[in-house]
Image (cartoon, grey):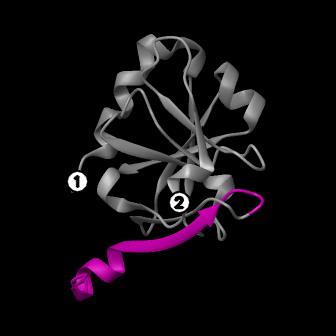
Amino acid sequence: MRNLPTQAESWSNMIYTGGCHCGAVRFEVEVPKAPESEYCNCSICTKSGYQHLIVPAASFTLLTDPAALHTYTFNKGIAQHKFCKTCGIKSFYIPRTNPDGIDVNVNCLDQRPPDLRVVQFDGQNWEQHGPALAHKSRQT
């Protein structure tokens, strides 16, 4: 049974649902009331239109069968890109910068957080800038 949040917790965090285009992949994610996301200019993010929202793994719940997902890796094979087997949408993945977390595609949320702040991330120079994201998957 899930403990009810304290009043302070309910003011500081919000729960959003999301998923792929066809609905075979559905998830729930808990984020700060005013979350920060990254718009990355690396090759895979640019081509797929991915907008990053990195959270601790404990803040993410897959609501559907994981068998609906296919995993794609490239380069060092650390990041686990999760795609719907039916429609091909990547609604979340396990990022190389945060293997202890989940990176949700903001564009796959059913409702966009109204106080979302988007920052630019230089993924074309990932080796130099990637470590700056490591704190995002830590529990607070």
Residue 47 in the image, given as x and y percentages of width and height: 77, 28
Residue at 54% over, 64% down:
64
- SS state under label 2: loop
Q: Secondary structure at mark 1?
A: loop
Specify few, some or many for label 1: CA neighbours under 10 Å numbering under 14, 14-19, or 20 or more.
Answer: few
In which quadrant of the rendered view does residue 96 lie? top left
Residue placed furthest toward the front: 67
> Was residue 4 drawn as part of the magenta stretch in this picture?
yes
Q: Which mark is residue 139?
A: 1
Q: Residue at x 60, y 15 (%)?
A: 124
Residue 78, percent from left and from top: 42, 22
- Direction from residue 98 to residue 86 in the image, left or right: right
126 vs 84: above or below: above
Q: Which of labels 2 and 1 is toward the front?
A: 2
Q: Which mark is residue 65?
A: 2
Residue type at the position of mark 2? Asp
Q: Are marks 2 and 1 in contact (CB under 8 Å)?
A: no
Classify the position of the N terminus by image quarter. bottom left
- Is residue 104 magenta-colored? no
- Residues rendered magenta in the picture: 1-22
Q: Nearer the viewer, residue 104 or 119?
A: 104
3D distance between C-alphas at marks 2 and 1? 26 Å
Q: Which numbered disc, 2 or 1, marks the residue that appears first in the sequence? A: 2
